[in-house]
Each structure stands twice: as structure tokens, then as C-alpha cells.
Image (tube, coloured by chain):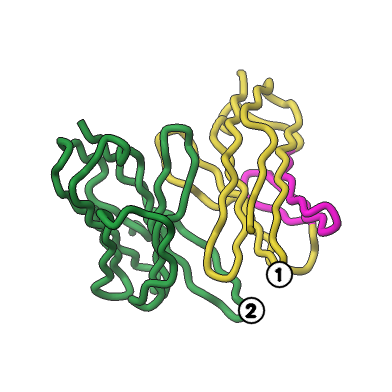
Chain colours: A yellow, B green
């Protein structure tokens, strides 16, 4: 069965700290992978996506993610977080028709 | 212009009532979705329509009935509302591309509170 695991449920960082959020997926076919961000009280917005090609994907707002096929992982990184990055982050994998979302990681950045 | 819009944004109602949430997308996408996000932020797909045809119907009570009058609209009707239906409901849309790739775009959500 398809599944997505996000290991960190809550992360608290100080501004300028580096961020890495883990995401592992389970899916047997060709994967499309996504990271979405949900700012407080808002809808989900796409941060970045991987379909094929270069496994290191750059997204908006300085975020990047690396697809490591052998580890079934798609971890999200940012070298220096800002207070405005406080949000919920969702990893997702797309199968044939359906997107499977992880349970989300709540990031709080302290000013 | 809002790409994916939902109405209403907030919905407060009594148990047992019937209510509808509307979704419209102006992106020209051929696939639309309904998701339920619970209080723990867990996001779960409910339904998906491709070109007005139902393609995903997860384990959702049959009190929930989606209706797609055309490709740009996917409405959600809920009968006999229960306390456990309280959640934020998100509509999304995508366009299936060659190779099966697509990207979902989400609406602003409808916060449903059942009293």
C-alpha cells in the first residue's frame, strides 16, 4: 500500500538555523513527490515537486529537497530559516490517480 | 483571480442538517478533488473527479455526495451532518500531463463546524 511517513511532528528552531524535514514514502511505481506548506489559517501551497531528472529540486523561498531513490526519501531542507517559515509542512506522493499526504510537520521558528 | 475558490469559507450548522460546499477552478484543469483535514491537520482524500467522472471514492460515508456539473466545478453535499464531520474541507484541482504527472492546486478551505 502507498504511504508517506514524516518523522518529525513538531520542530522548533531559532531564526537562521538550518532545517531538514524527513519524508519517506512507500510506493512501487514511478513516483511524483511534493512538498506543500500550509501557513496558519491558510490553504496548502506548493513548495516544490519532483517528477524526474535532477534529484535535487529547488523550490520557492529558498527550500530544496533531495530525492534519494535507494532510501525512498524526499527530505526538505533550508539552510537558514526565518520566522515567516513558521507553518505546517506536508510531504506527498502521487500514485496513479491519488495523492497520499504525510501527517505533516509543524515548524515553529523563534525570532 | 483566484485559481481554486470555495464557498462558503466558514459553515456553522446543527447536527442533522444538510449542507453543501461549492468549488470552482478557473485553471482549465480536468481533475478535481475533495480532501478533509481534521483537527490534527491530517489530510485525507475523499473524492476525485476526472472530466466529470468519479475516479476516486475513498471510504467515505454515503452521507457525502460529490457532484460535478462540469469540469470546472465540484460540489460536496453532506446529509445528516454529525459532530465528527467538523473539519476543514479543501478542494483541489490538477491537470494530468503526459507521463501521468500533475500538480495539485488547493482552494482556501471551508471550515465546517457541526454543533
Assign a secondary structure to mark 1. loop
Neighbourhood count class around disc 2 (C-alpha, 10 Å): few under 14, some 14–19, many 20 upward: few
**Nearer to us in this view, A14 or B91:** B91
| Mark drawn on residue A77 | none
Residue A47 among those drawn in magenta? no
Q: Is residue A68 left or right of residue A38?
A: right
Q: Residue at x 28, y 70 (%)?
A: B68
User: In the orientation shown, which residue stands out farthest toward the bottom?
Assistant: B98
Q: Chain of mark 2?
A: B
Q: Residue at x 66, y 52 (%)?
A: A59
The x, y position of residue B31, in whole percent, is 42, 71
| Residue pointed to by mark 2 | B99
The x, y position of residue B5, in whole percent, is 31, 56
**Nearer to us in this view, B47 or A32:** B47
The x, y position of residue B56, in whole percent, is 44, 66
- Residue stretch in magenta: A56-78
Q: Quadrant of the N terminus of chain B?
A: bottom left
The x, y position of residue A23, in whole percent, is 70, 45
Q: Main secondary structure of the magenta part?
A: strand
| Residue pointed to by mark 1 | A30
Q: Are marks 1 and 2 in contact (CB under 8 Å)?
A: yes
Amino acid at each position: 500500500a502507498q504511504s508517506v511517513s514524516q518523522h518529525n511532528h513538531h520542530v522548533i528552531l531559532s531564526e537562521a538555523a538550518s532545517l531538514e524535514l524527513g519524508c519517506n514514502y512507500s510506493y512501487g511505481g514511478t513516483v511524483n513527490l511534493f512538498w506543500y506548506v500550509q501557513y496558519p489559517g491558510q490553504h496548502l501551497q506548493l513548495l516544490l515537486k519532483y517528477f524526474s531528472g535532477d534529484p535535487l529540486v529547488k523550490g520557492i523561498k529558498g527550500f530544496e529537497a533531495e530525492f534519494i531513490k535507494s532510501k525512498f526519501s524526499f527530505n526538505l531542507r533550508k539552510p537558514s530559516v526565518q520566522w515567516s517559515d513558521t507553518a505546517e509542512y506536508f510531504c506527498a506522493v502521487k500514485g496513479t490517480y491519488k495523492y497520499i499526504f504525510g501527517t505533516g510537520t509543524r515548524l515553529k521558528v523563534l525570532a | 483571480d483566484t485559481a481554486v475558490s470555495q464557498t462558503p469559507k466558514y459553515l456553522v450548522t446543527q447536527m442533522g442538517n444538510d449542507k453543501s460546499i461549492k468549488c470552482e477552478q478557473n485553471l482549465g484543469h480536468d481533475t478535481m478533488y475533495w480532501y478533509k483535514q481534521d483537527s490534527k491537520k491530517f489530510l485525507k482524500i475523499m473524492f476525485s473527479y476526472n472530466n466529470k467522472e468519479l475516479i476516486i471514492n475513498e471510504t467515505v460515508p454515503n452521507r457525502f455526495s460529490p457532484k460535478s456539473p462540469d469540469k470546472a466545478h465540484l460540489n460536496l453535499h453532506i446529509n445528516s451532518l454529525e459532530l465528527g464531520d467538523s473539519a476543514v474541507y479543501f478542494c483541489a484541482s490538477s491537470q494530468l500531463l503526459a507521463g501521468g504527472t500533475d500538480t495539485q492546486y488547493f482552494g482556501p478551505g471551508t471550515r465546517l463546524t457541526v454543533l
